[in-house]
Image (cartoon, rainbow, N blue to C red):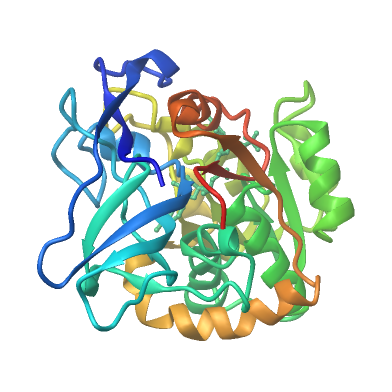
Amino acid sequence: MSDKNRKIVLASPISGIPRADNFRTVETDIPVPGEGQILVRHVYLSLDPYQRPAIAGAHVTSNKALEEEEVPSAETIGQVVSSNNPDFVVGDYVRHMGGWQEYSVADSNQVFRVDPDQAPLSTYLGILGMPGLTAYASMIKLADVQAGQSVLVSSASGPVGSMVGQIAVRKGATAYGVAGSDEKCSFVVDDLGFADCINYKAADYPGSLAERIPNGVDIYHDAVGGQMLIDALGVLKNYGTVVMCGLISQYNESEKGRGFNLAPAIIKRAVMKGLIVFDFEDKRQEFFDLAAPWVREGKIKYREDRAIGIENTGAHFERLMSGQNFGKALVVLGDH
Ligand SMILES: NC(=O)c1ccc[n+]([C@@H]2O[C@H](COP(=O)([O-])OP(=O)(O)OC[C@H]3O[C@@H](n4cnc5c(N)ncnc54)[C@H](OP(=O)(O)O)[C@@H]3O)[C@@H](O)[C@H]2O)c1
């Protein structure tokens, strides 16, 4: 084991899409666990869209902007390498908010054990982790999707969207996706089992939405906000449900509260429900017990978009926030 901890700190204020050079790598001593604490060597680091507004101090998880030299927060999967706590032994795998770094110390009440025999370790950050739970909350708890219904899913190839559509299909609904390239759309239809997927960067969008979904949808899962939400409302049936899950089209904007016309939501008598995944933490085990067998049996498909090495975290975050990622964004930090 190396005797140094490499961490990523904010090097300069971010304007618009984050750039790799907004961050830099620093090396410090590996922290020493105090009484009751454990030392964790990170194996996987999760990059998620919410980290962009969180760094800006404009997110439900953080209303304080990250300052220069501070380490961004993130969920990690890691292995216990030293323990001052009887509940954890060296070699245990855990999930916790370890941050953009190779090692962290943690209190036992902030750490959750994960089992590599139940599912691949990386999936605890993706399809079976927070993004998967978000999809479960959207379809099962908020929209209550039913057989025979139809669902439109934005960011359909990403970890949340891919699980939203696959849960809907498993419930007997028809899923339609929206994604940013023909390659992503092929994956959404051919691998994930959506009925169709519309490339919103094609010249015929948004007219293609109404042409390809002539009967409309009962549910729209919104990861994007802004104009994409307005366009999706065009194919929502009357009394349809919108799950407002994300606003990725606005995360790189500095001005908050940009106005846009939500009149179509009124005209459709739409039900719009806001989703905060942390409200469903008590459903995590219920979701995992349902979905982990699907993953083990290959019934649920997923993609990961991996970078290797902590020094590549900033560039990988730039890739995610400019829409170039294709699948769950992860940084691989070590062996397991
Ligand atoms: N409410 C909650 O509790 C909760 C929890 C988890 C996630 N979320 C939200 O769910 C959404 C999806 O998250 P995820 O983890 O599954 O990540 P993700 O889908 O991999 O997010 C990145 C993708 O978003 C799309 N995108 C990026 N910029 C865009 C833009 N300007 N306009 C339209 N699309 C853009 C791109 O896909 P395309 O190329 O297909 O556009 C990109 O590949 C995010 O908005 C996230 O914040 C919310």
What residue is at 49 percent from the left and 27 percent from the top?
312
Measured as percent of width and height from the top left, residue 206 is found at 70, 33
Query: Image height check: is 177 above or below 139?
Result: above
Which one is nearer the viewer's eye here, 305 or 208?
A: 305
Measured as percent of width and height from the top left, residue 19 is found at 43, 17
What residue is at 59 percent from the left and 62 percent from the top?
123
Q: Is residue 50 left or right of residue 204?
A: left
Query: Image height check: is 234 above or below 291?
Result: above
Query: Image height check: is 75 above or below 11?
Result: below
Which one is nearer the viewer's eye here, 263 or 14?
A: 14
Q: Is residue 11 left or right of residue 264?
A: left
Measured as percent of width and height from the top left, residue 308 is found at 57, 35
Measured as percent of width and height from the top left, residue 278 is found at 33, 67
What residue is at 46 percent from the left and 42 percent from the top?
47
Q: Is residue 114 left or right of residue 118?
A: left
- Extreme right residue here? 190
Question: Where on the picture, by quarter, is residue 117?
Answer: bottom right
Which one is nearer the viewer's eye here, 119 or 33?
A: 33
Visible residue check, residue 27:
yes
Visible residue check, residue 213:
no
> Count of labels shown?
0
Q: Is residue 166 left or right of residue 195?
A: left
Which one is nearer the viewer's eye here, 52 or 265?
A: 52
Q: Quadrant of the C terminus?
A: bottom right
